[in-house]
């Protein structure tokens, strides 16, 4: 098999790119993805809040793959970037002229001893997996007081704001039920602060104070004892690293994340421990292989790994792939745009939009997005999912 364009991964990035390539008139596109379901993951925050059912966040992949795109329902297992061939688990070998690499992220629970068992046990949950997001809602609803820990690693994860959002929504519910006063809520993160853009960080600091959440920055979750219900954190400070063990009644954790194994083991994977695909941050072209482009969670563009970033990356990749096939200069340039919709309470959202300069980058006219708003909550709950399914995945937005 040989094709002009091969796309690995039919998630937010792969389907957006495939749809845009079709609209540009390309008729020899192969999409490789083994998944039967396509998930709109940003709604998993609201699944964890008990507002949306997990079944409402997914659609059949067969209904999403754009018409005219050949779908190989198989997993890529190896890429020979010199020979320009992708090998699949089912034994196919697919040659390409241009490759778009976007297989997303692998959750790495194994990097924290005890974390996987804690998530499977009665006191642990996360919104990072379809199977566990509904459990967040259940544990938050059953919580009657005690120690609640919300944790995020310092290494790159998708939607880095998601752990905070889970904490804020839980605190809001507990406040409404009169049990927040009897709870000790901690937000522990390997990052050095609440958020990298000062204009939004100020608002989030007020939200943290409003709920009485204790923060621990530069604190990595390094071990969990699910039986004893303790979590150990390693905190980096001016005098080096110190370890602290905290008891918990509820442990909500974003696991460390990395590029999928077949990417890390291929020459296309980066040299960091997480194996993100190294790309030029503006053209999204692979630094070593000019006929390969990567976007979405798997690439090392230094911005927040979000669907919002993909919305800005997809047209750039499409323009640059087409130019590469024509032997022309690359016209597309990605400015690092990403957005993080912080749900700070039921009915309140702060929409943080920014770019590589880490300055606010608002895209909604006449709306002050530097404060928590009800209309932004409605955007998250109804507007963005409709935009995603009806426009973005069809190459129209
Ligand atoms: C809890 C949570 C909240 C979030 N909130 C937001 C938000 O509010 N706003 C926002 O913009 N973003 C948010 N995100 C992030 C957003 O969902 C991701 O950034 C986005 O889905 C990444 O798209 P992707 O195409 O890179 O990966 P994915 O959408 O994860 O798709 C990857 C695809 O690759 C396929 N694949 C994997 N391995 C292989 C293989 N070996 N061969 C072939 N195919 C393979 C998979 O089956 C999958 O279909 C959130 C994510 C989570 C988990």
Image (cartoon, rainbow, N blue to C red):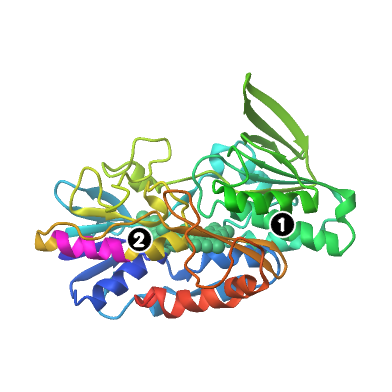
94 or 300, nearer to the observer:
300
Q: Position of residue 261 (x, y in %)?
A: 39, 45
Residue 114, how many percent across, how many down?
A: 64, 39
Which label is found at residue 44?
Answer: none
Report if residue 296 lies within the magenta region: no
The residue sitting at 18% across, 53% down in the picture is 291
Q: Is residue 367 left or right of residue 150?
A: left
Give the residues drawn in magenta, as a range. 315-324
Answer yes or no: is residue 357 visible: yes
Q: Nearer the viewer, residue 239 or 148?
A: 239
> Quarter of the image holding residue 76?
bottom left
**Element type where label 1 sits in the image:** helix
Can you identify the residue that label 1 sits on?
Answer: 168
**Residue 313 — which label?**
2
Q: Quadrant of residue 142?
A: bottom right
What secondary structure predominates along the stretch shown in magenta?
A: helix
Mark 1–mark 2 Cα distance, whole angstroms, equals: 30 Å
Name the outermost residue toward the left.
327
Residue appearing at x 24%, y 44% in the figure: 287
Lower position in the chain sequence, tag 1 or tag 2: 1
For label 1, the crowd category at 10 Å Cα-Cα, with few meaning under 14, some 14 to 19 and many 20 or more, is many
Q: Residue at x 29, y 43 (%)?
A: 266
- In this view of the protein, which residue sits in the foreground, 259 or 197? 197
* Residue placed furthest toward the top: 239
């Amino acid at each position: 098999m040989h094709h002009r364009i091969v796309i690995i991964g039919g998630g937010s990035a792969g389907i957006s790119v495939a749809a845009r390539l079709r609209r540009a008139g390309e008729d020899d596109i192969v999409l490789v993805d083994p998944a039967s379901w396509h998930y709109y993951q940003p709604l998993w925050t609201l699944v964890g809040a008990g507002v949306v059912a997990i079944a409402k966040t997914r659609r059949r992949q067969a209904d999403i793959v754009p018409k005219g795109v050949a779908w190989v329902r198989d997993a890529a297992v190896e890429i020979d970037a010199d020979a320009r061939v992708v090998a699949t688990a089912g034994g196919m070998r697919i040659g390409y002229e241009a490759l778009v690499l976007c297989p997303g992220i692998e959750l790495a629970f194994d990097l924290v001893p005890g974390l996987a068992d804690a998530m499977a046990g009665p006191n642990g949950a996360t919104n990072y997996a379809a199977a566990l997001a509904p459990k967040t809602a259940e544990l938050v609803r059953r919580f009657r007081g005690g120690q609640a820990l919300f944790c995020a690693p310092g290494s790159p994860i998708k939607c880095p704001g998601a752990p905070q959002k889970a904490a804020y929504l839980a605190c809001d519910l507990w406040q409404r039920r009169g049990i927040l006063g009897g709870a000790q809520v901690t937000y522990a993160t390997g990052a050095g602060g609440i958020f990298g853009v000062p204009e939004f960080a100020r608002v989030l600091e007020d939200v943290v104070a409003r709920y009485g959440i204790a923060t621990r920055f530069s604190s990595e979750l390094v071990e969990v004892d699910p039986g004893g219900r303790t979590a150990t954190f390693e905190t980096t400070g001016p005098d080096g690293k110190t370890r602290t063990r905290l008891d918990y009644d509820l442990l909500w954790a974003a696991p460390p994340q990395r590029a999928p194994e077949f990417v890390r083991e291929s020459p296309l994977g980066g040299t960091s421990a997480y194996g993100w695909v190294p790309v030029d941050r503006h053209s999204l072209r692979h630094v070593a292989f000019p006929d390969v482009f990567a976007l979405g969670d798997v690439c090392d563009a230094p911005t927040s790994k979000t669907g919002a970033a993909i919305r800005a990356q997809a047209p750039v990749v499409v323009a640059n792939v087409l130019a590469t096939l024509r032997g022309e200069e690359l016209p597309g340039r990605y400015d690092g745009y990403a957005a993080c919709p912080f749900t700070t309470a039921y009915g309140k959202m702060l929409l943080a939009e920014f770019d590589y300069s880490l300055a606010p980058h608002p895209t909604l006219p006449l709306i002050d997005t530097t404060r928590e708003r009800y209309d932004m909550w409605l955007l998250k709950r109804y507007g963005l999912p409709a935009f995603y399914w009806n426009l973005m995945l069809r190459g129209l937005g």
